[in-house]
């Protein structure tokens, strides 16, 4: 075991690392500047257990109803060997609907090495004919660990090129879907695109063989009728690569947390809280939907501009404390030279607010 691996084992309490999946890998890109999350995820810390231990349990996850609805919709879309799915994908890509296509189910109860080999062989066999590949086993390296991805995903090969197909159960109503859910589907799909590109590249194929356009299939309105749309995930791929590269260089992050840092979920809660507070975090409201420690970080960020969101923090030019913002707005504090522009805007905003409250048009 290398010294870095030993250090990571010490951080998580000498227990096996928590394995990543497509959702957790996608969530890594949500807050790339957060050292706390990078260290904990790089070490494979069980964050739900850690959050519960320090008194801030995570409060998100899919309901059984949502999971059941998603499974039913996926089965509907994949019925009859994916005939309707093939039509949806072809029409959305603007290519003729093939008269026939092969369907290969790469799931099953085989061991991971066998499934990975079956997936590799099937996906790299080539051929111009249309093909659909269900549940391929893919993989990515995250902080030195090989993560196996077992997606509810179909990789469609049309005209000799692959497109990742992501099936989600959230509805498209009047042609519009929830932007937050679409964004989450895009970054999760980018994980699959990257993993599929790496698998094919290892066999000597160009990565462009896997398109950056992902086909997203959702139910139309409140019915069970599927509708397909295209998502360009190039931006998400760049963010994902950057964060994975950062986590591959964990030594530098570990130097910043101290040799005695621990996130062992069995440790004393006060010790854990003190250790976590020594590691820089960049809380934002969006963290509540993707990070198990978000409620702890939100409590820690009370009185800080970052708790109001990244746009507010950036607009204030790095002024960190809400009390300081209010003092500058009221003219009760002389701004530092680097705060002059933000302070002028704050005073102007305060005057506008006062005028609005008093009804004085001046």
Image (cartoon, grey):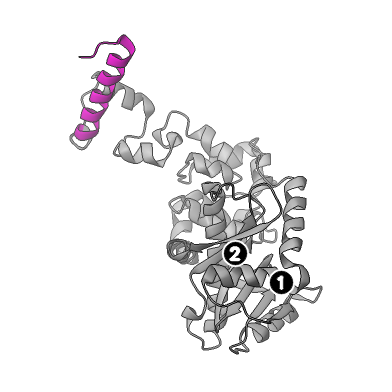
**Separation of residues labelled 2 and 1 (CA atoms):** 47 Å
Q: Residues within 10 Å of mark 1 (few under 14, many from 20)?
A: many
Q: Secondary structure at mark 2?
A: helix
Figure check: 273 above or below 206: above
Location of residue 129 (image quadrant)? bottom right
Residue in front for this viewpoint, 82 or 205: 82
Location of residue 45 (image quadrant)? bottom right
Residue 296 on the magenta span: no
Q: Secondary structure at mark 1?
A: helix
The quarter of the rendered structure image containing the C terminus is top left
Which residue position is annotated with label 2? 6
Q: Earlier in the sequence, mark 2 or mark 1?
A: 2
Q: Position of residue 336 (x, y in %)?
A: 21, 32
Residue in front for this viewpoint, 252 or 223: 223
Q: Position of residue 175 (x, y in %)?
A: 54, 51
Figure check: 141 above or below 60: below
Residue 122 is marked as: none
Q: What is the magenta range?
A: 340-362
In the image, what residue occupies the spot 59% across and 64% down? 6
């Amino acid at each position: 075991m290398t010294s870095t691996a030993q250090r990571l084992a010490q951080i998580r309490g000498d227990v096996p690392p928590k394995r990543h999946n497509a959702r957790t890998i996608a969530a890594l890109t949500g807050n790339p500047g957060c050292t706390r999350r990078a260290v904990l995820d790089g070490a494979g810390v069980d964050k739900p257990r850690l959050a519960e231990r320090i008194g801030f349990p995570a409060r998100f996850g899919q309901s059984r109803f949502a999971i059941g609805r998603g499974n039913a919709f996926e089965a509907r879309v994949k019925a009859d060997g994916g005939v309707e799915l093939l039509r949806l994908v072809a029409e959305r890509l603007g290519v003729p609907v093939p008269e026939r296509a092969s369907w290969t189910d790469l799931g099953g109860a085989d061991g991971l090495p066998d499934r990975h080999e079956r997936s590799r062989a099937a996906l790299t066999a080539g051929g111009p004919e249309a093909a659909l590949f269900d549940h391929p086993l893919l993989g990515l390296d995250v902080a030195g660990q090989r993560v196996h991805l077992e997606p509810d995903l179909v990789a469609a090969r049309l005209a000799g090129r692959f497109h990742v197909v992501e099936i989600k159960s959230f509805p498209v109503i009047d042609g519009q879907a929830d932007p937050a859910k679409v964004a989450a589907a895009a970054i999760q799909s980018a994980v699959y695109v990257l993993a599929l590109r790496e698998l094919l590249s290892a066999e000597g194929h160009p990565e462009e063989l896997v398109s950056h356009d992902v086909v997203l299939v959702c139910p139309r309105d409140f019915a069970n009728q599927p509708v397909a749309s295209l998502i360009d995930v190039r931006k998400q791929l760049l963010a994902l690569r950057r964060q994975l590269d950062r986590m591959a260089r964990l030594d530098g992050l570990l130097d910043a947390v101290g040799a005695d840092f621990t996130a062992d979920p069995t440790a004393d809660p006060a010790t854990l809280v003190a250790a976590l507070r020594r590691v820089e975090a960049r809380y934002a409201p969006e963290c509540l939907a993707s990070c198990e420690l978000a409620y702890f970080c939100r409590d820690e960020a009370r009185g800080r501009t970052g708790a109001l969101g990244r746009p507010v923090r950036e607009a204030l030019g790095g002024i960190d404390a809400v009390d300081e913002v209010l003092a500058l707005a009221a003219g009760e504090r002389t701004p530092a030279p680097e705060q002059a522009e933000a302070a002028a805007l704050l005073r102007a905003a305060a005057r506008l607010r006062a005028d609005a409250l008093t009804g004085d048009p001046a």
